[in-house]
Amino acid sequence: MKILYFITELGLGGAEVLLVNLANKMVSDGHCVSIVALGIVNAHEQRLDSRITVHLVKMTKNLEGFAKAYRTCLAISRQQKWDVVHAHMFHANIVARLARPFFGGARLISTAHSNNEGGRARMLAYRVTDFLSDINTNVSHGALARYVSEQFFSRAKSICVYNFVDTKQYSPNLNMRTLMRSQEGLEADAFVMLSVGRLVPEKHQSLLLHAFAVIARNHPHVRLFLVGDGPERADLEKLADDLGIMPIVRFSGSQKNVERWYNAADLFVLTSRIEGFGLVLAEAMACGCPAIATDVGGCAEVVGDVGTLVPPDSVDTLVEAIRRHISLNAAQRAVLGAAQRRRVVQLFDIDNVVVQWQKIYAEGLPELQ
């Protein structure tokens, strides 16, 4: 098959990581693949298979930018007759839908990666362009249910396809744990908490900092790593300083080999207000790192009955959940981490989900046959 992917940006977010892994898998299985990224960034140049052609549109989010994107679509459509056009995230979904005439009979798939990809105007844009797509997907049943119930996606052609994790790359590694903790200068008895994600309001890392400040009063051996970057960084650093925890909180910035941090940690905490799936949550679990997550979006579907969910805005509940994990001994944490890894391997392993995508690409949805 000839597959063309659209995505808003090729940064380090969960949707971008998923697309890169999916594209690489498709190429390795013998398919012809190209990617159109509307933005200016390609943070995955070293990870993408060299056989994949990447078109960086450098689109501005205005009429001139959209016109430039359409010209790119027209040029690409003349280079190749595509079998599948698969778009990810809001701007790419809308551009791909409106550019559908350029791609003839290609099957057009729109994938949303959250239960809320923006304000009301964006959601209405999904609704009025819904007729242009052949298949709509979202990354959790909960997120999909919202899109369908509010008629942003039509029920008849919409399904859930979970995000996936390379459970070979993301796996427990004692040597990696020892090396990382040594490199970070961690004491032997340090209890390391970890959060991974963009530093933006939606990820709500301020909730974690407030909870961590309470925990640190009675547990002097705790440490917190925040892996990721974004516009909230300066405010979060100031908050950590105001709370008196800056010496034991480390802002590590964006990282490409995040599995090293998952292995170094004793507890992973996701405090998002909005999540479609929670890819970093599944990655941490795949590495055997016990996890706590706020009960939003698809997080409940990821953790199932082997993880811990807390309300999205309750410091007290989060503090109690963290205390319970700190009270576990090493053997108990290992048992919990192993159970969480088994769940990810069973439900979200990359090989299983890629087979599902290949079937959708080749056959469409069963109810459409």
Image: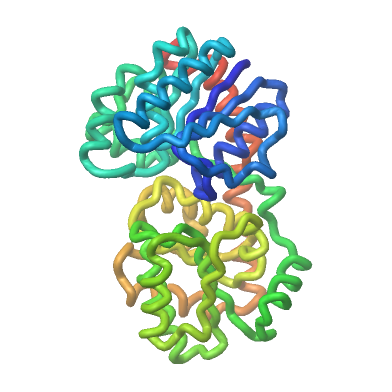
Q: Confirm whether residue 45 shows in the render.
A: yes
Location of residue 180 (image quadrant): bottom right
Q: What residue sits 37% from the left and 49% below the top?
A: 297
Percent coordinates x, y for residue 27 in the rendering: 68, 27
In the depicted structure, whether residue 358 falls above or below residue 42? above
Front-most of residues 88 and 284: 88
User: What's the coloring here?
Assistant: rainbow
Percent coordinates x, y for residue 325 in the rendering: 51, 75
Front-most of residues 236 and 285: 236
Q: Residue furthest front?
A: 64
Q: Confirm whether residue 294 shows in the render.
A: no
Please give left or right for residue 306 compared with residue 135 in the image.
Answer: right
Q: Name the image quarter holding the N terminus.
A: top right
Q: What residue sits 41% from the left and 21% below the top?
A: 70
Percent coordinates x, y for residue 121 in the rendering: 22, 37
Please give left or right for residue 140 compared with residue 25 in the image.
Answer: left
Location of residue 285 (image quadrant): bottom right
Q: Residue furthest right?
A: 175
Number of disc labels = 0
Front-most of residues 308 and 355: 355
Q: Name the image quarter holding the C terminus.
A: top left
Q: What residue sits 36% from the left and 72% below the top?
A: 235
In the depicted structure, whether residue 173 falls above or below residue 87? below
Q: What residue sits 58% from the left and 47% below the top?
A: 43
Please give left or right for residue 310 compared with residue 353 in the image.
Answer: left
Percent coordinates x, y for residue 324 in the rendering: 48, 77
